Image (tube, rainbow, N blue to C red):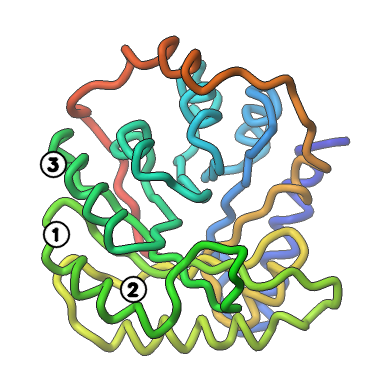
Amino acid sequence: MDIAENVKNVQERIAAAARAAGRDPEDVTLVAATKMNDMEKVKEAVRAGIRVCGENRVQELVEKSAVGAYRGAELHFIGHLQKNKVKYVVGEVLLIESIDSAELLECIDEQAKKRSVVQDVLLEVNIGGEASKSGLAPDELPAVLEKASTLSSIRVRGLMAIPPISAVKGENGGYFARMHQLFVDNQAKKYDNVSMDFLSMGMSGDFEDAIAEGANMVRVGTEIFGARPYPAKESWFRTCLRVNNRYKASRSARPVLRAP
């Protein structure tokens, strides 16, 4: 497997999909989903031109950050985030893409205040209404956006979605179109601390379809790194003990998340 060749291929496919939709390829951000890929693979992807890495698991994010795996790239958190692990993520990533409740927003805001940062986030929408997935129902968005407008240490930058799994190309187009309409509708509304800049949807099997329907951020793992490995597990407790000292109350310099 040649990660550099895979990155080039994915970038070319993104560019082609964007042009086919009448859009500038530079407006689409590729997030390399690095879950279960080791430090060397992540570094290889960054050397090949990946500018944004997305991590699904807090334990992996903590471990890989400690050894500089993401150096040279922005870092997003793209997996389900439990409230008791918020302290390991806030201020360590540029964007948390998976906010699925007002309670989680409040928890992130509280931690961001402690660290003297403003944390950028996306609201995750369960667009398929699947009981097995986290995310807000579309009709819950207004209340959560209202809540976000009262929180001074978070900034909502857009929406994220993971539609139902489909083996048929194009079958998820309807879900992506609905997400884009939600995105557009909420762009027109004015809330404090909210700017609808990013619509994150589309993964390895359907990112081209997502771009066709308006995504400007796609999360791609398998098409870059290949099928995921299953390494030996290290306990969460041990990981936290090993790296906890690197976390500070604030950071002297954080990158800025810029809209496309």
Question: Which residue is identified by label 3?
Answer: 113
Label drawn at residue 196: 2
- The crowd level at tag 2 (other Cα within 10 Å; few <14, some 14-19, many 20+) is some
Q: Quadrant of residue 198?
A: bottom left
Q: Which of the two marks, 1 or 2, is nearer to us in this view?
A: 1
The image quadrant that residue 21 belongs to is bottom right
**Where 101 falls versus 213 (above or below)?**
above
Amino acid under disc 1: Leu
Residue named by callout 1: 151
Dot 1: element: loop
Query: What's the distance in space between the residues labelled 3 and 2, CA to CA?
Result: 23 Å
Quarter holding the N terminus is top right
**Residue at 70% in and 77% down:** 209
Q: Circle 2 — which element?
A: strand
Residue at 47% across / 72% down in the picture? 125
Residue 58: x %, y % from top left: 48, 35
Q: Earlier in the sequence, mark 1 or mark 3?
A: 3
Q: CA distance from mark 1 to mark 2?
A: 16 Å
Looking at marks 3 and 2 on the same chain, the residue that comes earlier in the sequence is marked by: 3
**Looking at the picture, which amino acid does disc 3 mark?**
Lys
From the viewer's perspective, is the residue at label 3 or at label 2 nearer? 3
* Residue 51, placed above or below residue 201: above
Alpha carbon of mark 1 to alpha carbon of mark 3: how far?
10 Å
Q: Amino acid at mark 2?
A: Met
Locate residue 48 relative to residue 253 in the image: left or right: right
Location of residue 157 in the rendering, given as x and y in whole percent from the top left corner: 33, 64
Answer with left or right where residue 24 lies relative to residue 230.
Answer: left
Q: Position of residue 140 (x, y in %)?
A: 35, 79
Examine the rendered structure and indicate whether residue 158 appears above or below residue 246.
below
Q: Are marks 1 and 3 in contact (CB under 8 Å)?
A: no
Provide residue 260's location: percent of width, then percent of height.
Answer: 42, 66
